[in-house]
Amino acid sequence: MKSVAVITGGAGLLGREHAIALASDHSILLIDNDSEKLKGALEAIHNELPGSDVYLLQCDITSEHEVERAVNEICNLFDKIDVLINNAALNPVPGIINPYNRFENFDPEQWRNEYEVGLTGTLLMCKYVGRVMLKQNSGVVINIRQLCQ
């Protein structure tokens, strides 16, 4: 059985790239809050790597209930999780025109949203996936931090 990699922020550019990098020897599970973008990511991955083993799961990683549900679904599907890539972020990709690209324009509400996804989401994913990895006595967690400009 292939190793299983879970990627948060899976519908984004980096999420797709992580999936493509791992798809040859991993079953990939992309997690994102945006189901339409997830479908687009799946299409892009299959265009580059036809027949790759990629699954989609819509989940708000800032919700403990949703993270617990998602990890249970993953375990029901695969019985294990070998890799967790915490990649989810709200910040814009550099080069895209956005008023929050500059710190002096950064809104406190946007800060709270960034904090929830980037830190709380990472904590919750590590908490629930970590429990699975402890039971199986193996696993790798990779935390990707994306900085605002």
Image (cartoon, helix red, strand yellow):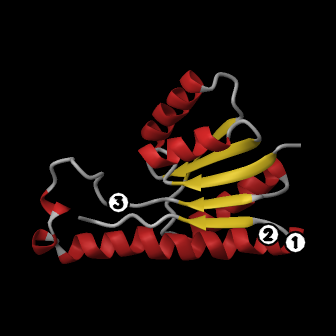
Q: Is mark 1 on a helix, strand or loop?
A: loop
Above or below for 141 versus 79: below
Q: Name the residue under label 3.
A: 90
Q: Mark 2 points at which residue?
A: 133
| For the residues bearing labels 2 and 1, Cβ distance under 8 angstroms | yes
| For the residues bearing labels 1 and 3, Cβ distance under 8 angstroms | no
Q: Residue 100's image quarter? A: bottom left
Q: Name the residue under label 1.
A: 137
Residue 69 position in % (x across, y down): 66, 62
Give the left or right position of residue 91, taking residue 118 as reference: left
The disc, 1 or 3, on the residue closer to the chain's N-terminal end is 3
Q: Which residue is drawn at 49% across and 40% down?
A: 38
Circle 1 packing at 10 Å, graded few (<14), some (14-19), many (20+), is few
Q: Which residue is drawn at 34% across and 69% down?
A: 114
Above or below for 12 versus 40: below
Q: Is mark 3 on a helix, strand or loop?
A: loop
Residue 106 position in % (x across, y down): 16, 71
Circle 2 packing at 10 Å, graded few (<14), some (14-19), many (20+), is some
